[in-house]
């Protein structure tokens, strides 16, 4: 007796940007556009723009 081997649950990857089914060509995104969008998000979120340290107004009133 042979047991029917259960098919591996194939999870359809979803585009992390718009949640649409991913395209085989642009995995895991649905389109090149979303791939770009994700990259932009990553860049804007990963890179911290160093704020210019404002020099304190040294008001040295001396004699
Ligand atoms: Zn998408």
Image (cartoon, rainbow, N blue to C red):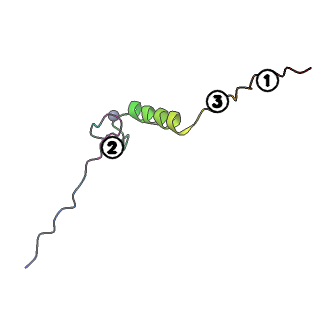
Residue at the limit of the structure toward the right, as seen here: 63
Marks 2 and 1, how far apart at CA: 60 Å
Q: Secondary structure at mark 1?
A: loop
Marks 1 and 3, how far apart at CA: 20 Å
**Would you name the residue on which mark 3 appears?**
51
* Vertical position of residue 28 compared to residue 2: above or below: above
Residue 17: quarter of image: top left
Residue, x 89% and y 21% (percent of image)? Answer: 62
> How would you rate the neighbour count of disc 1 (Cα within 10 Å): few for under 14, some for 14-19, many for 20 or more?
few
Report the disc number at residue 7. none
Residue 52: quarter of image: top right
* Vertical position of residue 10 compared to residue 32: above or below: below
Q: Tell whether 63 sits left or right of 37.
A: right
Whether the residue under disc 1 has CB within 8 Å of ligand 1: no
Residue 20's spot in the image, x, y percent?
27, 36
Residue, x 29% and y 42% (percent of image)? Answer: 14
Q: Secondary structure at mark 3?
A: loop
Q: Tell whether 8 sits left or right of 36.
A: left
In the rendered structure, are the residues bearing label 3 and label 2 in contact, judged by CB atoms less than 8 Å apart?
Answer: no
Reply yes or no: does residue 13 show up in magenta: yes
- Residues rendered magenta in the picture: 12-18
Report the disc number at residue 58. 1
Residue 50's spot in the image, x, y percent?
64, 33
Q: For marks 3 and 2, give the one nearer the viewer.
A: 3
- Comes first in the chain, label 1 or label 3: 3
Report the disc number at residue 24. 2
Marks 3 and 2, how far apart at CA: 41 Å
């Amino acid at each position: 007796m042979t047991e029917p081997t259960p098919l591996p649950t194939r999870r359809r990857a979803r585009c992390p940007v718009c949640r649409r089914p991913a395209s085989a060509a642009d995995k895991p995104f649905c389109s090149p556009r979303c791939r770009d969008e994700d990259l932009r998000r990553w860049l804007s979120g990963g890179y911290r723009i160093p704020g210019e340290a404002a020099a304190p107004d040294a008001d040295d009133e001396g004699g």
